Image (spheres, helix red, strand yellow):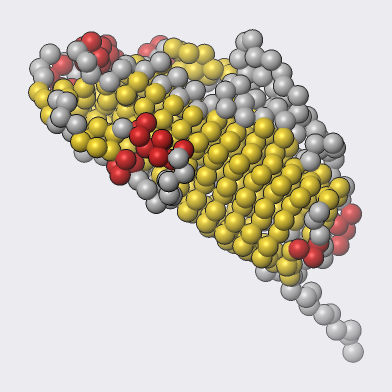
Amino acid sequence: MKLRYINFQRHLIGLFFATFLAGTFTSGLKAEQASIATTRPQVLVDATSQGIRGDGATLNTAAIQLAIDSLTSHGGGVLEFPAGRYVTGTIQLKDNVRLRLGPDAILLGSHNPADYRILEPFVTGDGGNLGYALVTAVDASHVGIEGSGKIDGQGKSLKAAQAKFTIRPFLIRWVRCTDVVVRDVHLTDPGAWTMHFFQCKNVVAEKLTIRSADSHLTNNDGIDIDSCQGALVSDCDIESGDDAICVKTTSPKTCGDQIITDCKLKTRCNGIKLGTESIGDFANIRVSNCKLHDIGMSGIALYAVDGAQLHDVTLTDLDMDGVTVPISIRLGARLKTFHPGDQMRPVGSLHDITIENIHATGAKQIGLLINGIPDHPVESLRLKNIDITLNGGGKITDADVQLAEKEKAYPEYNMFGKVMPAYGAYIRHARGVSSEHVKLSTTRPDARPGVDLIDAEGVNVGDFAVATPAAPTTLPDR
């Protein structure tokens, strides 16, 4: 193996998260501010020196894997790809190895389904069997992907190569990894989710461009953080077919100590979601300074339906335009498990949530949709400085709509139907919802009430400023 040595600034992510846990972290801090210089030399290997060809035709899976294995056996290093198109099937990153994609370097997923492997099985919340991945790492530490190049899963071509689209690789999947950094790269056209972190610790996903909004593919999430401890997602530009950023728990492990900040999101589904998969708890999660536009479902979706205790969550300074439901919250009793041996949990809780400094325009269905279930209310929800402008146009008969409880249903913005009995807020089974400077208005006349409260203790209609234009007066014929 042809080697050369470089000195580089190695990110001490543990130091970064220790700072966060001590309470000194601010949303403006970037990952590089948590790094310090080290004198340890790092091996840098040019991929083309290892028989890896960027001709867009040669299958490089074996050669790339051999280079990774050799690097990790020598203590680690960087496998650098210069400009070119490098076709590969599943490759596995290992301890202390990073991929670096230079300008105009593209890692291309193979068109052949036989070139993909499952290193760790996975079942989605809707029962889909996934687990294939283009780039993956299992039980690895100090790993990552960086550079201005691209990873293209060629999901459309891979789908076309199968009579039934059963081999649907994640673009990138990290399983039980520690100290992971993914920075600067462009990620596109996955067969399933773009990037999945499962039971990882100390994760940084920064300055990524993700494009996975292909209309011919499904479940093309942007970033999924699943049962992880310590994650920073910042300065990412995501356009996804499914949820843009999703924090979830498909295992009983708590998902906590998360920061999501300074991202730009567009999606046919939810912008920022906690849940739906929620068998493990959620705690200490901060979302700030994000811009969301053209959101097909909910801008903010908080869904605890599988027994999770979802608490200590703050979402602040979010701008939305063209969103169906800006804020959707659901505590439910689906109570699903996702891995063999996991025990079904009782109904969980959703409490101590702060949502403030939210500005949304062009909302379509309702501003706030907040639902617990009988005997299990949403509790201690603080709403402050929220300004939502809706399209309006509701009829007086819409106010008579009765929404079913659907305690065990899959949670989504439209689970109760698309016609709401109020235009601004529907709050049911809730305790201790505080509202300060919450404005809900429509651009067109709306005959429904602004707010509908059902089994909502400590909440008053007068806590919300609602406004809709007067309907035009029809003058009698003379």
Quadrant where the image shows the C terminus:
bottom right
Quarter of the figure with residue 338: top right
Q: For this view, does 447 lie left or right of residue 147? A: right
Q: Give the image location of residue 178, x and y in percent.
A: 39, 23
Name which residue lies at 41% across and 30% down.
202
Query: Is residue 337 placed above or below 225 in the rendered structure?
Result: above
Q: Is residue 356 above or below residue 128?
A: below
Q: Residue at x 28, y 38 (%)?
A: 35
Quadrant of the drawing holding the N terminus: top left
Towards the viewer: 369 or 171: 369
Q: Residue at x 46, y 33 (%)?
A: 230
Q: Quadrant of residue 54?
A: top left
Q: Give the residue furthest to the bottom.
A: 478
| Residue 476 seen by the camera | yes
Q: Position of residue 55 (x, y in %)?
A: 20, 25
Residue 98, compared with residue 373, is above or below; it is: above
Please provide percent x and percent y for residue 96: 28, 20
Q: Is residue 325 visible?
A: no
Q: Is residue 269 left or right of residue 40?
A: right
Q: Is residue 371 left or right of residue 26?
A: right
Foreground pick, 159 / 261: 261
